Image: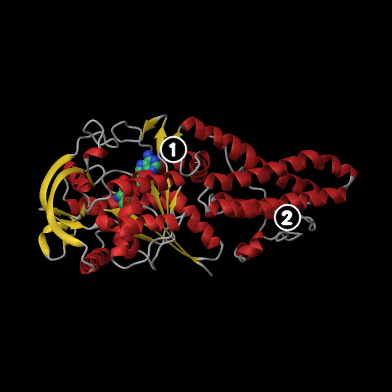
Amino acid sequence: MSKFYVTTPIYYVNAEPHIGHAYTAFAADVLARWHRLKGDEVFFLTGTDENASKNVEAAEKAGKPVADYVREMSARWASTLDSLGVSHDRFIRTTDSDHVRGVLDFIEKVKAGGDIYKGKYVGWYCTGCEAFVTESDLALGKCPIHQKPPKKIEEENYFFKLSKYKKQLLDHIANHPDFIKPVIRRNEIVSYITHHLEDISISRQGRRWGITFPGDDEQTVYVWFDALVNYITGGKWWPADLHIVGKDIIKFHCALWPAMLSSAGLPLPTQVFAHGFFTIDGKKISKSLGNAVDPVELAQAIGLDGLRYFLLREIPFGNDGDFSLERLKLRYQSDLANGLGNLVQRVLAMIEKYCDGKIPERADGSAAPTWQSYELKLADCSFDGALTDVWNLLKTLDGLIDREQPWVLAKTDPERLRRVLYTLAESIRHVAVLLWPFLTETSEKILDSLGVLDESRKKPYDKLKSWGLLAPGTRIKKGPPLFPRLT
Ligand code: MSP
């Protein structure tokens, strides 16, 4: 049995979750579910990043004590992820006492390695990014992401000797081509490390919120130096196999974090995969623009599986992409309702009509090529690729029906008809298993309609992937359409 440890970034609680956040969580969730299906020991970590200045600002705006505000918002995030079917094993809050203790221990290790010193920070801080920024990060004096000028800061801080790790980081990246994916982000990081890596301030002076810096009551731990450690404090083991992150936070995950780990004498995660950014109808998702689509409302309108399918199928993971309700409805109709849903209904109807509603005797076949390709794609976070493989199989099955014309075979060659119907039904069982990590509810419905018993669903992965598991004589149960018309 292998182990698989996957994480999402922990979310700031200064605002409600939107579909951009759901996207990161869905991607990690699919991988967690796939590895569980494979029989691996999986740990899937997500949670909330609560010690940030932007949370304090949001609490002040809401007129609430910070601790109350972050507790309420964190609960909102947790329930959103639950409603979205995200199957994490732990939801960590950076205000959890085990996390706070873990951060203090971590800093002690870094201190012991001689990598922390006190100095004066004079420069800029962007609260939106929760990052110390330099002139080169700004466009016309503003943060290009948050479109706001950063705050000028002059304070005594503790510094981390990040620059000391320049060569070590570059060597690691060169020797581990899969450490940062996709390649465009790896190149970005290599250039950043080569030209801009500097020591970084890891504390803030005179703040009331956050983790108190060990040995200095005047300072709190810089929020990223605290948040990144969640991957250790919240995990069951270390290192993680995969951190899934958005492209906006790769410097922290691919430069700062590995340097912190090296300093503490800990191994590095196997991979950081950075996905792109969603826009909505061409515009950045933001509260002020009023386009921050609530993923739970959307899932209620279109079905959770419809939403998960669309987000992971529409945009190749790693690329930027646009989200539009129109595209969502189109794909729902063409791929899910007319594609998958229709095929399943047709096959079930033919088994009812021509085989007395029972699975006919076994016929030869194989879904192995689809499985092979699908597994390679999933191992590479190519969610759209894996789904395309499944839809290619559906196309082949549609083609088989068109070619064989079961309604003609019913009159001319009943034996062949039964073979064709077995092949179709067994292939649909494979489709259900292939889709299980993505569209769990739909997958279960398909297996229900094929009469697949609970114990057959829990068979080892290799068995599930093998041909012929569908037992002849099993009674099928044609249910309501899998993807009803959208209103
Ligand atoms: N708190 C930090 C992460 C700390 S991890 C140790 C953070 N939080 S966040 O709430 O701002 O973002 C969480 C994730 O959501 C990030 O991966 C970010 O890239 C992603 N997204 C936020 N908006 C997004 C889109 N519009 N599109 C796609 N993903 C987006 O960063």
Q: What is the secondary structure assignment of the residue under circle 2? A: loop
Q: Alpha-carbon neighbours of circle 2 within 10 Å: few (<14), some, or many (≥20)?
A: some
Q: Mark 1 points at which residue?
A: 320
- Left or right of 357 in this view: 221: left
- Left or right of 190 in this view: 411: right
Q: In which quarter of the image is residue 436?
A: bottom right
Q: Where is residue 318 in the image (x, y as percent from the top left)?
A: 46, 44
Q: How many labels does the image show?
A: 2
- Between residue 177 and residue 480, name the one nearer to us: 177
| Residue type indicated by callout 1 | Asp
Q: Where is residue 190 in the image (x, y as percent from the top left)?
A: 37, 48
- Left or right of 81 in this view: 32: right
Q: Quadrant of residue 225?
A: bottom left
Q: What is the secondary structure assignment of the residue under circle 1? A: loop
Q: Residue at x 58, y 35 (%)?
A: 333
Outermost residue toward the right? 412
Q: Distance between the residues labelled 1 and 2?
A: 36 Å
| Residue type indicated by callout 2 | Ser
Mark 1 or 2, which is nearer the eye? 1
Q: Residue at x 68, y 52 (%)?
A: 369
Q: Does label 1 or label 2 sit earlier along the sequence? A: 1
Q: Where is residue 325 in the image (x, y as percent from the top left)?
A: 47, 32
Q: Name the residue under label 2.
A: 366
In this rendering, does residue 444 appear at all? no
Q: Alpha-carbon neighbours of circle 1 within 10 Å: few (<14), some, or many (≥20)?
A: some
- Ligand 1 within 8 Å, label 2 CB: no
